[in-house]
Image (cartoon, rainbow, N blue to C red):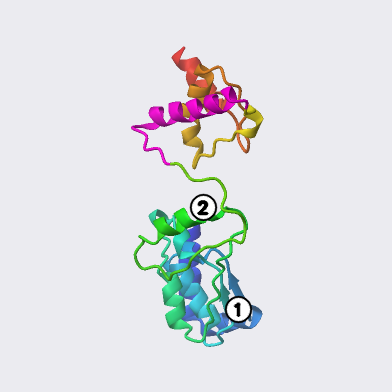
């Protein structure tokens, strides 16, 4: 029995044994759910059963951050919640404390193309920041070369490597970037992980292929 089936069987138990459901309703009288955009159908059914008609439910979610549809997450649960709990108050957290105004303007322009959004507009009272530049790379190798060349230009103009950072979405992207940095004899450090070629599985594969 995996985690998903545990949720399913518990839901069936509550439906078939109302006194057990009532026990948990009395135990959990106020419900708070974070990352609500990542909930699936059975998790939402849990919330509906536990909450009943009390309306003592608070959810926190962002329909623009739904990235787990491949494992069953239903961003539509946010809209379902608003329909099932008509008395719910929506509070939009639109002020951003991390990014500059230029970055937020670009993000707003991109996300507006999504369908079925509840709608919000991020803003900041901070500075505009540096202009955003866009480079459409031919492939990952071209992208890595472009990044390294930009860093080299920065360095040639008196910039310090310690002031440069490469942000990537997943660890799988680090290999090509690391290879380009090594070819350019450019020192680097990985934060929040380890270098691609220092990972144990990569060392094992390299020894086998040697």
Report whether residue 120 is seen.
yes
Residue 153 part of the magenta segment: yes
Checking the image for residue 39, the label placed there is none
Task: Give the residue displayed 43% in from the left and 71% down from the top.
Answer: 118
Q: How many neighbours does mark 1 have within 10 angstroms: few (below 14), some (14-19), or many (20 or more)?
A: some
- Queried whether the magenta region covers residue 205, the answer comes back as no
Q: Main secondary structure of the magenta part?
A: helix
Residue 152 versus residue 91: which sits nearer the camera?
A: 152
Residue 2, above or below 194 = below
Report which quarter residue 192 is drawn in: top right
Tag 2 secondary structure? helix
Determine which residue is flagged by label 1.
24
Q: Residues within 10 Å of mark 2 (few under 14, many from 20)?
A: some
Nearest the camera: 186 or 25?
A: 186
- Give the extent of the magenta segment: 134-158
Is 110 placed above or below 81 here? above
Q: Which mark is residue 102?
A: 2
In the rendered image, the vertical position of residue 2 relative to residue 207, given as above or below: below
Question: Depth check: 120 or 132 in front?
Answer: 132
On the image, the x and y values in percent for residue 157 come to 58, 25
* Observer able to see residue 39: no
* Relative image position of residue 114 (x, y in whole percent): 36, 61
Q: Nearer the viewer, residue 139 or 107?
A: 107
Count of numbered labels shown in the rendering: 2
The residue furthest top is 210
The percent coordinates of residue 167 (x first, y second) are 54, 39
In percent of width and height, residue 24 lies at 60, 78
């Amino acid at each position: 029995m995996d985690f998903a089936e545990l949720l399913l069987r518990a839901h069936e138990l509550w439906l078939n044994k109302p006194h057990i459901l009532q026990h948990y309703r009395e135990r959990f009288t106020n419900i708070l759910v974070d990352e609500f955009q990542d909930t699936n159908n059975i998790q939402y059914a849990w919330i509906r059963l536990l909450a009943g008609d009390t309306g003592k439910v608070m959810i926190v979610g962002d329909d623009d951050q739904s990235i787990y549809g491949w494992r069953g997450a239903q961003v539509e649960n946010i809209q379902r919640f608003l329909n099932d709990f008509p008395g719910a108050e929506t509070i939009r957290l639109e002020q951003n404390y991390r990014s500059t105004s230029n970055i937020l303007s670009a993000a707003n322009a991109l996300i507006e193309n999504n369908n079925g959004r509840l709608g919000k507009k991020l803003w900041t009272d901070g500075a505009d920041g540096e202009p955003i530049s866009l480079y459409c790379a031919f492939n990952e190798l071209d992208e890595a070369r472009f990044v390294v060349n930009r860093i080299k230009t920065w360095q040639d103009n008196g910039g310090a490597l310690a002031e440069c950072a490469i942000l990537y979405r997943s660890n799988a992207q680090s290999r090509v970037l690391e290879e380009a940095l090594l070819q350019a004899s450019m020192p680097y450090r990985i934060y929040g992980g380890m270098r691609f070629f220092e990972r144990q599985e990569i060392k094992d594969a390299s020894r086998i292929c040697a």
